[in-house]
């Protein structure tokens, strides 16, 4: 597959990449190389290869949406500088 300089300049403009005229020729060659490599993938025989799991086939593992306290109250409260029973105590901020 080949790209002309006008197409490369348009792609660069759409990508908001400023290219000088001499850079367009360099990028054109690099992009043609990439497209040629991708085109080679069409030559691979994948007839007996099962499809890999993709986003359409994957099933997410969902858990029940439940509110819990994590059952680690004492571990959390052990970091508190001051506590009263099962609660943090904080200094009064509003008079």
Image: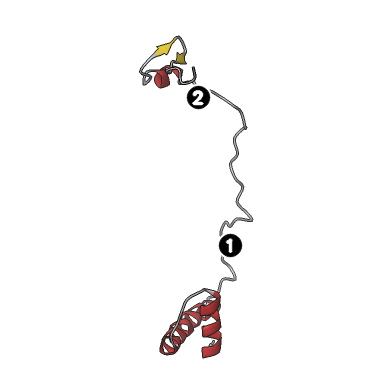
Residue 67 sits above or below residue 2 on the image: above
Q: Is residue 20 visible?
A: yes
The x, y position of residue 16, in whole percent, is: 51, 74
Left or right of 7? Residue 83 is left
Q: At 59% across and 26% down in the image, what residue appears?
A: 67
The x, y position of residue 79, in whole percent, is: 36, 21
The x, y position of residue 89, in whole percent, is: 43, 15
Q: Nearer the viewer, residue 1 or 46?
A: 1
Q: Earlier in the sequence, mark 2 or mark 1?
A: 1
Q: Nearer the viewer, residue 48 or 56?
A: 56
Residue 58 sits above or below residue 29 on the image: above
Residue 13 sits above or below residue 29 on the image: above
Q: Where on the picture, by quarter, is residue 49?
A: bottom right
Say which element carries label 1: loop
Which residue is tagged 2?
70
Q: Is residue 2 visible?
A: no
Q: In the image, which disc is placed on residue 31?
A: none
- Residue at the extreme front of the image, as rendered: 95
What is the CA distance from the residue labelled 2 to the residue labelled 1?
A: 42 Å
Screen quadrant of the N terminus: bottom right
Q: Residues within 10 Å of mark 1 (few under 14, many from 20)?
A: few
The x, y position of residue 28, in whole percent, is: 47, 86
Q: In the image, which disc is placed on residue 50?
A: 1
Q: At 40% across and 20% down in the image, what residue appears?
A: 75
Residue 2 sits above or below residue 63 on the image: below
Q: Nearer the viewer, residue 53 or 80?
A: 80
Q: Nearer the viewer, mark 2 or mark 1?
A: 2
- Residue at the extreme top of the image, as rendered: 85
Q: At 56% across and 59% down in the image, what residue appears?
A: 52
């Amino acid at each position: 597959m080949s790209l002309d300089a006008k197409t490369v300049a348009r792609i660069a403009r759409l990508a908001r990449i400023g290219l000088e005229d001499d850079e367009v020729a360099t990028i054109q060659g690099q992009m043609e190389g990439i497209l040629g490599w991708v085109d080679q993938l069409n030559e691979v025989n994948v007839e007996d290869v099962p499809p890999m799991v993709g986003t359409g086939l994957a099933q997410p593992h969902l858990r029940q949406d439940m509110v819990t306290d994590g059952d680690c109250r004492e571990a959390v409260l052990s970091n508190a500088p001051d506590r009263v029973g099962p609660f943090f105590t904080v200094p009064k901020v509003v008079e």
